[in-house]
Image (spheres, rainbow, N blue to C red):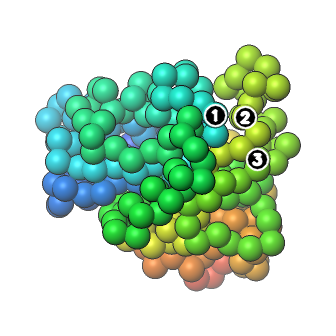
Amino acid sequence: MRLVITKSDEESARLAAGCIAEVVNEKRDSLLGFATGSTPEPVYAQLVAMCARGEVDFSGVRTVNLDEYVGLNAEDPHSYMYYMRKNLFDKAGIDLSRVTIPRGDADPEEEVRRLNAFSDKNNIDIQLLGVGVNGHIGFNEPCDCFYNKYHIVTLTEKTKKSNSRMFSRMEDVPERAITMGVGDIMRAKRIVFLANGIEKLDAMKAILEPRDVTPRIQGTILKFHQDCKIIIDKVLAELINPAPEVEVSYT
Ligand code: F6R
């Protein structure tokens, strides 16, 4: 794992966007793995700006998303499809025929089969990741095992509470989601992982410090990824003592 410590969250987003653009500029038809939530929003804003300046062209890429809430259709403003269209796809000219996102309103079991047929045939060139307060990546919640493939997950109370900030009421937060498994996340050729804010400290300590890899904190599996760049700002970094094998650099 490589850890890049930046001066600000804005700089972290710029750096992450640069990593994605570099991959696209090397390979026009890259498969890009995307995440949603507050953390990647400024990354998408940077990518849209780079696209407008002609620094990157997304017309040849394909994309795949980590997760979606079960029960929400693509027009629902809380759905991750809506989020991706608003933040990136519609602004960066990414045609929806090139996009793979779990369909929240489809039969969940059939949807899992469709997504796994896709992931069996395709390898992600770069995966953007954030982390939940409980250490989840995608919606891989703390449990007794690591899931390999897309699957249906029941969200924990902690995740529902954290994500309720996006909904009007806690009761509106869906109970279940479809998520890519950590196996498929780990098969991405490159990972760029961002974490912002003190509420992510426990998760980031578990991931970066010399601690066990455990499915109770799913993000700890990233210790085993061959090309994972973690980007955090100096405020968070000051509170973490990375393991000796983590290669640390500063911007
Ligand atoms: C969403 C996803 C989640 C989020 C995580 C952090 O697609 O993969 O793992 O990255 O819940 O969310 P924020 O960035 O909103 O704190």
Type of residue at label 1? Gly
Give the residue at x 14% y 35%. 54
Residue located beneath label 1 in the image: 71
Q: Nearer the viewer, mark 1 or mark 3?
A: 1
Q: CA distance from mark 1 to mark 2?
A: 7 Å
Which residue in the structure is indicated by mark 2? 174
Marks 2 and 3 sit apart, C-alpha to C-alpha, by: 8 Å
Q: Residue at x 55, y 21 (%)?
A: 77
Which structural element holds mark 2? loop
Q: For residue 162, which quarter of the picture? A: top right
Q: Residue furthest top?
A: 168
Q: Residue lying farthest right? A: 157
Name the foreground residue: 63 vs 201.
Answer: 63
Q: Residue under circle 3?
A: 155
Question: Horizontal and vertical percent for residue 79?
Answer: 55, 31
Determine whether the beta carbon of the residue marked 3 sits less than 8 angstroms from the nearest atom of ligand 1: no
Instruction: Estimate how packed mark 1 is, as few (under 14), some (14 to 19) or many (20 or more) residues with alpha carbons within 10 Å.
Output: some
Work out whether mark 1 precedes mark 3 in sequence or the reverse, and give the earlier one.
1
Number of numbered callouts drawn: 3
Looking at the rendered structure, the kind of residue marked 3 is Leu
